[in-house]
Amino acid sequence: MNRKILYAAGAVAVTAGLVGAMSQASASRTVGVLVRDFDDNFLTVMRNGLTDYAATLDGVEVQVVDGENDVGKQLSQIENFIAAGVDAIVVNPADTSATDAMTEKAAAAGIPLVYVNLEPINIDAMPANQAFVGSNETDSGTLQAKEVCRLLKEQGVTEAKVLVLMGRLSNQAAVMRTKDVHDVIATPECSFMEVVEEQTGNWQRQQGADLMTNWITAGVEFDAVLANNDEMAVGAIQALKAAGVPMDSVIVAGIDATQDALSAMQDGDLDVTVFQDAAGQGSGALAAALALANGEEVERKGYIPFQLVTPANMQAYLTVN
């Protein structure tokens, strides 16, 4: 009988049948885990979610390596795990446009592979023993931009100039989150918004700060800053405060609901973020990998929903990520 992993908001729910199957599978399983950047705060929470879940399972060993945002290094790491004979591989890819090679290497070796957090571009062509666990990026930037639109209207702004801080352009999440913003602005309700500057900060706090400083120095006028992730949003806030810009004169929005971002929200500096369940993605990816290693069927796309976070409801998220 086929059993599928079911994904719910903020957690991974498994059918009763699958629990038994995974208990047997976890008797002696080794899973190789590739994380694109150990220094990223969000990915640290995701990694901890995966390893914490592994610690609850008897006989499961996870070997986690840092890809250092290097595609070539990640391909070598996959080859090393294959040579070591791991039972499954979990990959948080440095570049979603390079996942074909990863898929092919794992498929040729007959080792199940699960992508986590960043959706691979080849997802619909992946073999049956491969899957993705993450969140639907169509929702992330949409939730963010709609809330910024609502706040601007609430303030009585009729012509809003918007800055967009993009993530790494080779990542599907950055592409989709930016597209979401433009799609929202294209609607009649939010057509009063206009993107006046849009550059990549590569997900990095310092790069977000540097871009914001450059725009301020150049005299760019703006009413809101929409960042593809919280790290860049926090960087933008640091630059705004350093330049003496009153924080109540600009709306700043991020995505991920990291603890640093929520601290900024508590301080009244960050207006909007979107919760992405990092720990849930990590544990869900490991659950899917173990199920595939045991010959079970899992959903090809395991989506854990995004959730809008504002000052009104942030207390519920303060200890989550």
Image (spheres, rainbow, N blue to C red):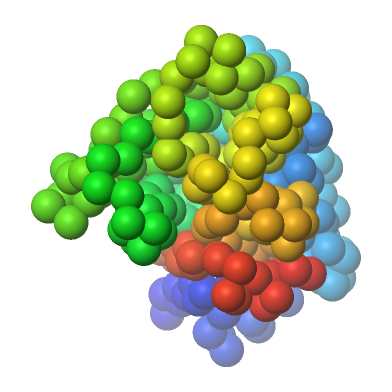
Q: Is residue 242 left or right of residue 310?
A: right
Res. 182 image quadrant: top left
The picture places residue 313, in percent across and down from the top left corner, at 59, 76
Tell me residue 315's x, y (percent). Answer: 70, 75
Image height check: is 199 above or below 26?
above
Q: Residue furthest left?
A: 188
Residue 17 in the image, given as x and y percentages of width and height: 55, 85
Q: Is residue 195 above or below residue 210?
A: below
Can residue 32 be seen at all in this image of the molecule? no
Q: Spot the residue most to the bottom.
A: 16
Tell me the quarter of the image containing the N terminus. Answer: bottom left
Q: Image point 67% across, 77% down: which residue? A: 316
| Residue 288 location, quadrant | bottom right
Residue at the (32%, 56%) spot, across then down: 156
The answer to whether any part of residue 68 appears in the image is: yes
Q: Residue at x 58, y 23 (%)?
A: 212
Q: Nearer the viewer, residue 70 or 166?
A: 166
Tell me: 234 left or right of 159.
right
Q: Quadrant of the C terminus?
A: bottom right
Above or below, 293 against 37 in this view is: below
